[in-house]
Image: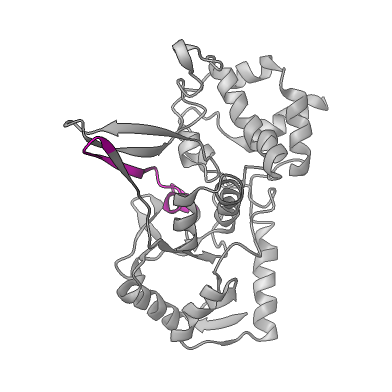
């Protein structure tokens, strides 16, 4: 573990903004919320944030991206793959969002071997930050994602006039070569451990049982339609919970033809299982037509289906879905706790 003075950390960010070919983005205060956006200067950084509106997932899996373009040449079509060759430097990522990106890596790189994702991911740098302020909707401690020991290039912990920096990768180590650092003292290492331990008691919201029990709980609750219908009664099927979730990875692919008819592009865009048309197939058949079915599917996917396929509980406890749901029915912690209580009533 290294230690860097606050002024030198600021200088590092300024240097990256000025000289690195990749776009440097970080957490910024925007009105009454925090967002990840392009940094014009290090002064814009708000590392004390509680929760950003969207996760940094959008930099490795954009809301909309062109996968390929095509153009007619004589009697054939020429296709060109599109990709972001430079990636991003993302500053201020909380541990639960790092855990979410680790899950996406398993899906898009290890399983799907998705080249557009892989290229963006391999050319990106993730600079994490230990949580300082905990959102009232967050229950990351219950999900084991309030702290993390991998998945970042650098992990920064605020120690007042200096930062403790844990180096996670060779590229992260290289980033520090341009600024003065020193080895952390035993007291500073202990202080970081104390800060992380104190986080466990900083959460108002918690899961009432170990997350490892979720797959069994949800499998047993699948046919309890009275519960799902009652809970989804106020759901608007707006899909906001899907949009803000850092682990949702469903997408649709559109072929878009230019007006002239001799060229076009293939685009990928985010999609979500709460949207009414998500499960619509040929001839208009919708195999999850009822909102309760879609609501159930979302929770089953987070706590059971993804675990069976990839070994991860696909809820990292960030609390974004709870914060942004206008109907107040998207809270995973509340749903899972009520299911558990119902089984033990």
Q: Nearer the viewer, residue 283 or 91?
A: 283
Determine if residue 36 is in view. yes
Screen quadrant of the N terminus: bottom right
Magenta segment range? 51-76
Residue 18, by quadrant, is bottom left
x and y percentages locating residue 336 in the rendered image: 69, 33
**Residue at 68% across / 83% down in the picture?**
187
Q: Nearer the viewer, residue 250 or 222?
A: 250
x and y percentages locating residue 331 in the rendered image: 58, 35
Residue 227, by quadrant, is top right
Determine if residue 159 is in view. no
Residue 342, by quadrant, is top right
| Whether residue 201 is situated above or below residue 76 in the rendered picture | below
Most extreme residue toward the right, as rendered? 344
x and y percentages locating residue 162 in the rendered image: 51, 80
x and y percentages locating residue 215 in the rendered image: 75, 35
**Residue at 35% across / 44% down in the picture?**
68
**Residue at 41% across / 34% down in the picture?**
253
- Answer whether residue 240 is magenta in the image: no
**Residue at 70% across / 34% down in the picture?**
304
- Answer whether residue 75 is magenta in the image: yes
């Amino acid at each position: 573990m290294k230690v860097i003075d606050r002024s030198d950390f600021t200088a590092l960010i300024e240097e990256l903004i000025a000289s690195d070919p990749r776009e440097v983005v970080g957490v910024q205060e925007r009105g009454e919320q925090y967002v990840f956006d392009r940094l014009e200067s290090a002064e814009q950084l708000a590392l004390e944030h509680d929760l950003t509106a969207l996760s940094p997932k959008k930099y490795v899996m954009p809301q909309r991206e062109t996968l390929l373009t095509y153009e007619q040449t004589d009697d054939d079509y020429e296709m060109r793959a599109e990709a972001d060759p430079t990636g991003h430097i993302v500053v201020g990522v909380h541990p639960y969002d790092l855990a979410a990106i680790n899950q996406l890596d398993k899906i898009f790189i290890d399983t799907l071997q998705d080249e557009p994702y892989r290229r963006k991911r391999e050319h990106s740098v993730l600079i994490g930050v230990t949580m300082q302020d905990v959102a009232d909707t967050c229950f990351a401690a219950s999900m084991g994602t309030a702290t993390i020991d991998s998945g970042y290039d650098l992990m920064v912990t605020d120690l007042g006039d200096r930062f403790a920096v844990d180096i996670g990768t060779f590229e992260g180590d290289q980033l520090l070569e341009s600024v003065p650092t020193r080895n952390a003292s035993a007291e500073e290492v202990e202080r970081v451990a104390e800060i992380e331990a104190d986080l466990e008691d900083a959460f108002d919201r918690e899961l009432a049982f170990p997350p490892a029990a979720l797959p069994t709980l949800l499998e047993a609750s699948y046919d309890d339609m009275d519960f799902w219908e009652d809970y989804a009664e106020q759901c608007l099927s707006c899909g906001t919970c899907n949009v803000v979730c850092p682990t949702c990875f469903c997408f649709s692919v559109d072929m878009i033809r230019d007006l002239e008819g001799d060229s076009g592009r293939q685009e990928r865009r985010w999609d979500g299982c709460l949207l009414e048309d998500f499960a619509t197939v040929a001839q208009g058949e919708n195999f999850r037509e009822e909102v309760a079915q879609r609501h159930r599917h979302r929770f089953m996917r987070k706590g059971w289906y993804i675990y069976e396929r990839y070994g991860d509980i696909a809820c990292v406890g960030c609390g974004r879905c709870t914060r942004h749901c206008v109907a107040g029915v998207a809270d995973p912690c509340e749903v899972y706790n009520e299911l558990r209580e119902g089984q033990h009533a």
